[in-house]
Image (cartoon, coloured by chain):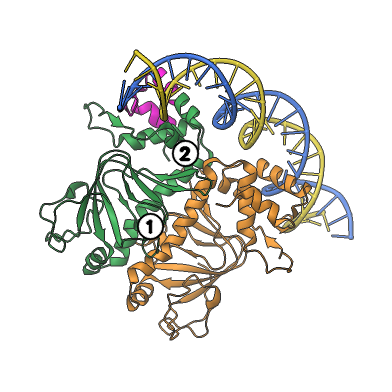
Chain colours: A orange, B green, C yellow, D blue
Amino acid sequence: MPPLLRHRPGAPHPAAPDCHSCALQGFCPADGGCPVERRYRLAKGDHLFHMDDAVRPCIYLVRSGCLKLYQLNQDGVQRIIDFPGPGRWLGADDIGAPRRHACALALNACEVDAVPYGRLMAMLERQPRSAELFGHMLSRDIARQQRLLAILRSSPAERRVAHFLLDRAGPAPAAGRAEAPAILPMSRQDIGDYLGLTPSTVSRVLSAFRQRGWVALRLRGFLLLARDSIAQLANLT
Amino acid sequence: MPPLLRHRPGAPHPAAPDCHSCALQGFCPADGGCPVERRYRLAKGDHLFHMDDAVRPCIYLVRSGCLKLYQLNQDGVQRIIDFPGPGRWLGADDIGAPRRHACALALNACEVDAVPYGRLMAMLERQPRSAELFGHMLSRDIARQQRLLAILRSSPAERRVAHFLLDRAGPAPAAGRAEAPAILPMSRQDIGDYLGLTPSTVSRVLSAFRQRGWVALRLRGFLLLARDSIAQLANLT
DNA sequence: CGTTCAATTGAACTTGCTCAAACCTCGTGG
DNA sequence: CCACGAGGTTTGAGCAAGTTCAATTGAACG
């Protein structure tokens, strides 16, 4: 079990924990009743939870770092579900289930805040239209899954990778500002599993992008040099 | 707007509406407070709602028939999301959104019951652990999406079609009983869009199954002759 | 009975996979 | 400090699967 930060459970959170990029944006009451209970620090390779763990009734907010959410087949083959990073949450789809249905592994050093279901629900119920709020909260994840489904259904490899890179790079920088280097903490194998491609194909496509001058590649990161070209190829709908 | 059945809103549902196969199985109070407000009858080709319609705060329970849930690209290309049939619901992922993000089209004659969010939520809140219940309700859909994701990521065409047929055929009949004929109300194009294949490939695979004696094909339906072989090919994990 | 649209089938082609070899990176230990 | 080894990455050649395009068949409906 990973070490946890000092923070008195039950008390309102001592300092605003990155509210500007929080997944609960707009749901917390303005009077500072932050529902975070604990902060976990994970080192690279640590598991936040395993498949078939008993579900601790919490959702987790990712503050920094990047995780790999995956399932293990009985064949031992992994099925990547997602790579949640800062501003995302995990565990909401295990609400009401007895055991976790996936593993969550830290790809690099991570900070993760735990919010107990009880506090989340109490907070929502203090708001009018709690059902709508909760639904809206979940709908972002459903929409993300559907975007991935759309890509997997029938896109060539280059479009899949283009989409993935844009997703990793985040929103475009303000006009006139340079692209920030983006990290790629997962292996080519992981990317391939996520996109339905083989590691070889991922590598080939990335090399092709590099040769066209679209990206600068490093082993665990990249820099977008031609976001427009990549976005055009990805053909975002 | 489709015609609606006579049923006094606000009153408890006059007759138990197919509770044995209802998607709300286990959530309704035992004392008969069925939250259904109205029943819609749709003819083949009718839309229950369109993309970008203002969201009427209801979820819809499919009682009979089969619908096509899809989005329209700006290119005019359709993206199939799902084919909800009896016992499924629609619209839960639009909770909290201002506009519907997909179209729902009846593929044949359908009966659909509407449940207002308000009643659903009131019903859940009368139960202990309403959050868990609601989460459990949604998790079935998420699990379905993830199963589809797994298939799309890297299965050959035959496995995709095998999986689709098993999904359409429903659970195996009791030992010794014959397979019931299953309907296939959608076009080959729709099946292809759903599975990430071309209509040609779908047709080829179905023909191959027929030639192996695994299925009997009709234009808008089929009959499983060798469920075992197909299940083995689908290799359900 | 003819029209129309969907489904089937065939042939050539393209894409991404498989298999395999070479290479790079990084941690480990001499 | 350097050599070594292990694992991940890149790249190539051949191959198999599915697509594209087009022609044919079939079914439904006026």
In front of the other: label 1 or label 2?
1
Q: Is residue A21 above or below residue D2?
A: below
Give the chain of mark 1. Answer: B
Q: In which quarter of the image is residue D25?
A: top left
User: Is the residue at mark 1 from the same chain as the one at mark 2?
Assistant: yes
- Residue A171 rendering spot, x and y as whole percentages: 62, 64
Mark 1 = which residue?
B53
Left or right, A190 with respect to D9, comes to left
* Frontmost residue, B231 versus B99: B99
Residue C16 versus residue B139 in the image, above or below? above
Q: How crowded is mark 2: few (under 14 residues within 10 Å), some or many (20 or more)?
A: many
Chain designation of label 2: B
Q: Which residue is drawn at 24% across and 32% down?
A: B173
Q: Residue A46 carries which label?
A: none
Label drawn at residue B193: 2
Residue shown at the point (67%, 61%) measured from the top left: A183
Residue at coordinates 40% horizontally, 66% vertically from top-left?
A56
The stretch in magenta equals B206-233
